[in-house]
Image (cartoon, rainbow, N blue to C red):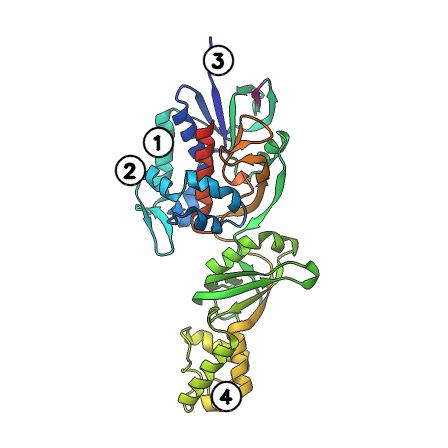
Amino acid sequence: MTQEKIIVVLGAGAAGFFAAINAKEKNPKAKCLLLEGSRRVLTKVKISGGGRCNVTHNLFDPKLLVQNYPRGFKELLSAFYSFQPKDMVSWLEKRGVKLKAEADGRMFPESNKSSTIIDCLSVEAAKLGVDLQLGQKIKSIQKKDELFHLELGDGTVLKVHKLILATGSSPSGYQLAESLGHKIVDPVPSLFTFNIKHPFLKDLPGQSFEKVDLELSFEKSLKLKKYKQQGPLLITHWGLSGPAVLKLSAFAARDLHESSYQAHLKVNFLWQEQTKEEALLVLENYKKENRDKGLGKNFPFSFSKRFWCELLSCLDIQQEKTWQELSKKNLSEIAFFLTEMSFQVDGKGVFKEEFVTAGGVDLKEIDFKTMESRLCSSLYFCGEILNIDGITGGFNFQNAWTTAWLAGNSV
């Protein structure tokens, strides 16, 4: 009698669920177990996007899509030609879930509820016969005679033909991968805000900018390169946040970690299009045309009066003065502050509950056509356990969907 084929997926997050669904759909006669060490499933799906679930991003060109991944962009390019955001949109629509794209490209279920995605995945897994088991911790894994021997928490041993690791950034998942011969790139935080203590920012929490230009640099002794980003910025009680800062933190994650989150951040509040010289020219022309107007209520830029007055205060320029009373030095100081002001980054904050890490299984050890290990046959990886991370906007979930689809279909 032929032994029943057993597929096991470890980790019941987004990647694990999607891998199990695809594996069972392609192998209906095999037994597919989805094992989760905790008592909860799809936790990041639940909290993503403030409880709405930022499923993916409406960027359908793989070459543009990969530019949103500080780590893994080379490997994901071929993967996205196999399964990308439009494929995930189609997969959900076939199961009655429609997504909508917001102005910034993020895609959410029309219901605006993460439970819609959770229910869809749960129902699909149950319909196909995926055996979900919670509270199933794995003590160890050994490969013997082409089978994986999984020692469960109660001491029983499960013999498995195909194994998919989708354990996210869990240390226990990394340990299991290492026990099977894989190298782990040490995980460090990604996607975080910057702690900055500066008198100028102290009274400006809540002030936002649609677009700024940022440049992050480090002490010369570290010999680290500069990082640049553009995008929206938000001033907070602890420093600076917003999409531009989060993107910067992701691309500079490793260098920031190595520098103990000490860095210099140059901010151009007028965007890259306006240099210090261009800003100075705008100020000089405004002075000529508004000589008798008061400084506190009149200025040539689109940011708030509150921001402008705080800038004047920081430069010891009295708001009661008129424009004609400003010296060339005053104008130059304002232009410099608006376009080249540098702040000292003195630590990192967090980005809501959506904790993302840079690190995981070394990508050189994975075949990205199948997500199978190059070191251990019949072993597959998907999701955040890999050394892949994307910026905010649905890109980390898309990595989960794509690598899980490949792993599930390949087993």
How far across and how far down the image is residue 146, in percent? 57, 19
Q: Marks 4 and 2, Cα distance to the nearest angstrom?
A: 64 Å
Q: Is residue 287 above or below residue 122?
A: below
- SS at badge 2: loop
Q: Is residue 327 above or below residue 315?
A: below
Tell me which label, 2 or 1, sits earlier in the chain. 2
On screen, residue 49 versus residue 96, left or right, reads right
Give the residue at mark 4: 326
Q: How many marks?
A: 4
Tell me which label, 3 or 4, sits earlier in the chain. 3
Q: Marks 2 and 3, Cα distance to the nearest angstrom?
A: 37 Å
Q: Marks 2 and 1, Cα distance to the nearest angstrom?
A: 12 Å
- SS at badge 4: loop
The amino acid on which the numbered mark 4 sits, given as a three-letter code, is: Leu
Give the residue at mark 3: 3
Give the residue at mark 2: 96
Residue at the (45%, 30%) spot, across then down:
408
User: Looking at the image, is mark 2 or mark 1 nearer the viewer?
Assistant: 2
On screen, residue 33 versus residue 169, left or right, reads left
Residue at the (62%, 57%) spot, across then down:
261
The amino acid on which the numbered mark 1 sits, given as a three-letter code, is: Val
